[in-house]
Amino acid sequence: MKGYYQPAGLIGWVNWLWILMIALFGLIMQLEVTHLNVWTYGAVAAFIVIALLTYFRRRVALTKESLWILPMFGVHTDKFRFSEMAHVQFTKRTILFSYDGEHYSFWMNQRFLNNLKKEIEGQTND
């Protein structure tokens, strides 16, 4: 199963606030000049492109024994084996866990999170 993820917590907030700063720059340029200009168009276009890339390039894949976090750009893929995950917690839309001494938290859609929870519970019951 494949889906999308976003970093949860403070990292996710900071990431999206920096992206919103691009749109805010376009608004400020429009208000300072009092009419639409090339800077406003450029900032709005950049905001839309970066926001869409940020959302749709953060992909996650679920297999029977692991969770794969695919990178936005590059070739480094994170693979989290269910058997090696520790302190796994689920909230309404977030999974929090520890893996190799690092703490991770990801926001995912409800359907993907439910399937992930079933797979992890299936691994612990076996």
Image (cartoon, helix red, strand yellow):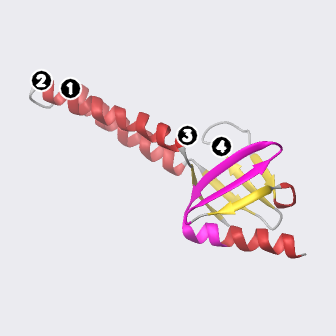
Q: Tell me which residue sits at (10%, 30%) in the image.
A: 35
The quarter in which the C terminus is drawn is bottom right
Marked residue nearer the N-terminal end (2 or 4): 2
For label 3, the residue is 11
For label 1, the residue is 29
Q: CA distance from mark 2 to mark 4?
A: 39 Å
Q: Are marks 3 and 1 in contact (CB under 8 Å)?
A: no
What number is the disc on residue 71? 4
Residues shaded magenta? 92-114
Q: Tell me which residue sits at (76%, 71%) in the image.
A: 119
Q: CA distance from mark 3 to mark 1?
A: 28 Å
Please, what is the three-letter code of the amino acid marked with disc 1?
A: Met
Residue 107, horizontal then vertical, whole percent: 57, 56
Q: Are marks 2 and 3 in contact (CB under 8 Å)?
A: no
Residue 49, horizontal then vertical, whole percent: 41, 41
Vertical arrangement, residue 11 with respect to residue 33, above or below: below
Q: Is label 3 or label 1 in front?
A: 3
Q: Are marks 1 and 2 in contact (CB under 8 Å)?
A: yes
Label 4 crowd bin: few (<14), some (14–19), many (20+), radius 10 Å: some
Query: Is-magenta flag for residue 103?
Result: yes
Q: Are marks 4 and 1 in contact (CB under 8 Å)?
A: no
**Under tag 3, what secondary structure?**
helix
For label 2, the residue is 33
Query: Is-magenta flag for residue 51?
Result: no
